[in-house]
Amino acid sequence: MPELPDVEVFRRLFEQKALNLEIAEVAVNSPEMLVGIEADAWRSKLVGSQFTETLRHGKHLLTALSGGAWVVWHFGMSGFFSVFARMDEEPPHDRVRIDFASGSRLGYSCQRKLGEVGLTPSPDTFLKEKGLGPDALDPSLDRSSFVRSLSTKRGTIKSALMDQKLLAGVGNVYSDEILFQASVYPGARTSDLQEERLAAIHEAMRRVLQQAIDAGADPQAMPEGFLLPRRESDASCPRCGGSVEKKKFSGRSGFYCPSCQSV
DNA sequence: TTCCATGTTCCGCA
DNA sequence: TTGCGGAACATGGA
């Protein structure tokens, strides 16, 4: 679930439900998911404090604490937030839970435990440490800088789009959608693509991510013509009606339409 | 039972 | 030396 659009939806939920509330209690049910800090130390940073602002970079969500530090949330393949108005509710696989003095609670669930929760002094420090590229929707990643950074890549265009050090936020599902919308075969060598095609991918990337956010990252609410709700081998292509194919590209399964997408 | 899953990191090979 | 691609990671559903 959690690629850029999903995390943006989480950010908005957090912004709406968790900002400026005193943190009364913190439960760390799966301490192994905390990175670089002990559960007790992390808890005591939060309790008595408040979240004051949020920032999303790619698939990471950073939330500022009134004490100065920032909590870093990463959702792996199965993470999400849930908010409860009542204290007697709790979702399954609740790895971390924050109870607010106002009586509501925020749960961080991550069934597969591939996510991470941590603490950083500042977003800058964190981004530098991780070596993340610019956020895929950042205006600074314009057509020319997108083309420039992709021009150094040797592998497939699909894996280039998913390289978080190049640009942050695009994962397996949205790389497929972007390439479908741009009519480019996922297994095309990046170095074989002309500049106009890279520019088309850039344009499709911005459009797809924004539309997915507007749809609340809900597959059923995506615009007509999206491949995303049809990630099955026997599905029909929303554009030509032909059959969607599934194939491994550098270890991940990609879905594409062989007649609409080409090198 | 075996395979697969929307993420990241590590290792071997070119 | 650098970078690509596959395996591994943890867990549960088909």
Image (tube, coloured by chain):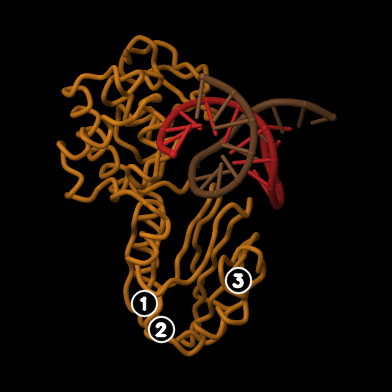
Chain colours: A orange, B brown, C red
Please give the residue where the numbered disc 2 appears in the rendered image. A50
Is A141 or A78 nearer to us in this picture?
A141
The amino acid type of the residue labelled 2 equals: Gln
Chain letter, disc 3 residue: A
Q: What element carries label 2?
A: loop
Q: Does the residue at mark 1 contact the one at mark 2 (Cβ under 8 Å)?
A: yes
Kindly identify which chain the residue marked by label 1 belongs to: A
* Residue corresponding to mark 3: A89
Which label is found at residue A19? 1
Residue type, mark 1 in image: Leu
Tell me which residue sits at (18%, 40%) in the image. Answer: A145
Residue A230, image x, y percentages: 45, 27
Foreground tag (1 vs 2)? 2
Residue at 22% over, 51% down: A138
Residue A202 position, x and y percent, is 22, 34
Residue in the image at 40% along x and 50% along y:
A6
Dot 3: few (<14), some (14–19), or many (≥20) neighbours within 10 Å? few
